[in-house]
């Protein structure tokens, strides 16, 4: 599984790189603060909503600590998607939130 640190993702965003991010936390967790531009698809809905994703794109998966996003990364990779897990999750995130 490919991984990216919270700091590496923050650097990509600060460089205005095009990044596709999916936050797999529950809606109430995301409401407490999320990375600007992230799409929320709770882990339990990833399978049902994966038709919304483009296999030609790369997705960075985010959660609270990196566990759920790791499971989502493995699941989506097994279905042909290109995903990267953000290690440490939002607990490691030091960038801006909305």
Image (spheres, rainbow, N blue to C red):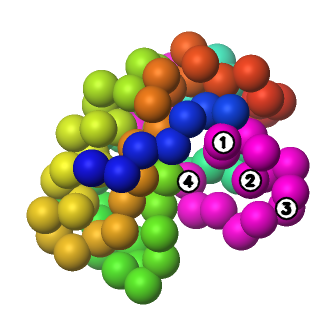
Horizontal relation, residue 93 to residue 23: left or right: right
Q: Nearer the viewer, residue 37 or 94?
A: 94
Horizontal relation, residue 24 to residue 70: left or right: right
Question: Which label's residue is closer to the chain start, 4 or 3?
Answer: 3
Q: Is residue 50 above or below residue 75?
A: below
Q: Pointer 1: residues within 10 angstroms few (<14), some, or many (20+)?
A: few
Residue 12 is labelled as: 2
User: Which contiguous range is marked in magenta?
Assistant: 8-29
Residue 2, image x, y percentages: 36, 51
Residue 20, image x, y percentages: 58, 62
Q: Is residue 84 above or below residue 31?
A: below
Instruction: Look at 35% across and 68% down and name the residue there.
Output: 82
Toward the bottom, the furthest residue is 56
Nearer to us of marks 4 and 1 is: 1
Toward the left, the furthest residue is 78
Give the residue at mark 3: 16
Q: Pointer 4: residues within 10 angstroms few (<14), some, or many (20+)?
A: many
Give the residue at mark 4: 21
Helix, strand or loop at label 2? It is helix
Give the residue at mark 1: 8
Q: CA distance from mark 4 to mark 3?
A: 14 Å
Nearer to us of marks 3 and 1 is: 1
Q: CA distance from mark 3 to mark 2?
A: 6 Å
């Amino acid at each position: 599984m490919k991984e990216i640190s919270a700091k590496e993702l923050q650097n990509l965003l600060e460089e205005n790189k095009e990044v596709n991010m999916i936050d797999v936390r529950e809606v109430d967790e995301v409401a407490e603060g999320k990375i600007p531009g992230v799409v929320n698809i709770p882990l339990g809905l990833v399978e049902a909503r994966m038709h919304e994703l483009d296999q030609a794109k790369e997705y960075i998966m985010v959660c609270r600590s990196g566990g759920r996003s790791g499971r989502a990364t493995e699941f989506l990779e097994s279905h042909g998607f290109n995903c990267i897990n953000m290690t440490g999750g939002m607990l490691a995130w030091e960038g801006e939130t909305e």
